[in-house]
Amino acid sequence: MLLGAGFIGAAHARSLAGHRGVDFVGVYDIDPARARALAAEHGCEVLTDVSAAFDPDRVDAVLIASSTDTHAEHLRRAADTGIAVLCEKPIDADLAAATEIARHVEAAGIPAMVDFNRRYDRDNAELRRLVAAGEVGAIELIQLTSRGPVVPPLSYVAVSGGQLRDQTVHFFDLARWIAAADPVEVYATGSPLAEPRLADYGDIDTSVAVLKLPSGALVQIDSVRRTGYGYDERIEVHGSTGLVEARRQQTGGVLRYRAGGVVGDALHPGWFDRVALTYPAALDAFVTALEGGPATYPTLADGLKAQAVAEAATRSLTSGRTEPITYP
């Protein structure tokens, strides 16, 4: 069952409908018209009562792509009915509430995945494999870049939790995953350069976060809400014996050589164009685990840890100091 028929829900619906191992049963959304439209597109049922999504006699798993304020309650229902769950981040906007519901789900013993889908980007996964294999020696510096093409609408900003919790949190997770270590402290600074009105919401659109790993190695993440050239995402890991890099991805790889210079293909126009393939890949990892394969997906514990880093970074943004990271 799919809970949520908005933009991300529609992306997940395409993955569910296209997966050979999934019987896409139905869609629920607080907006019935939106649910009907998505269900009609994929030939599945429209649910008028969310309780029907948690019927263990019909449903093996739910995918939570509804608004953030509903995630915890849907996770609780899944745990109480013994249904596996794949949940969009965050578990809950409040870290303490997220921790409480994660413990409840863990106690129930159901499979539960947080959809940090960037782990399933081909280049990111290969970069991590090379780092884990010792290709760069001991990690000394990780550089991550997340630069989106446009500032979100202010109506979205008002409920997003801020850039560090909303955008950069994906890269806090990637940093932990790549380094196989939990950062111990963070310093963050930022400014509302592209959209000064963000200051009215206590938010920013341009930021840098510096994390320190237990080894003393550093992680630097720069996040930008607006570029003039498309969506820019890349990772570099510098180690004691070498470097690996997941470079910017362009829409194509053809170069045109002319008298005035060399012309290449542009970057993807938006973040979704860049990461669209990671959604079905993440779903496949979850389904594989449900079918008895290895459970390699990001867990609720991973979600809590990335959120804890984001909370400390947000505190640093206000305090102007390096802040310790306290994990649930």
Image (spheres, rainbow, N blue to C red):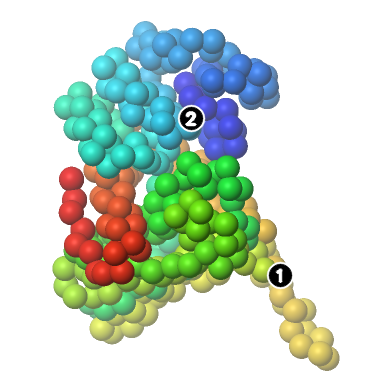
Q: Which is nearer the eye, 62 or 130?
A: 62
Q: Quadrant of residue 245?
A: bottom left
Q: Say whether residue 165 is visible.
A: yes
Q: The residue tagged with tag 2: helix, strand or loop?
A: loop
Which residue sits furthest right?
259
Q: Quadrant of residue 130?
A: bottom left
* Residue holding disc 1: 265
Please report the residue visible at 48 percent of the width from the left and 41 percent of the height from the top. Answer: 159
Q: Say whether residue 277 is visible.
A: no
Please report the residue visible at 35 percent of the width from the left and 12 percent of the height from the top. Answer: 56
Q: The residue tagged with tag 1: helix, strand or loop?
A: loop
- Mark 2 residue crowding within 10 angstroms, few (<14) / some (14–19) / many (20+): many
Which residue sits furthest bottom?
259
In this view, 272 is above or below 190: above
- The kind of residue on which mark 2 rests is Ser
Q: Which is nearer the eye, 1 or 123?
A: 1
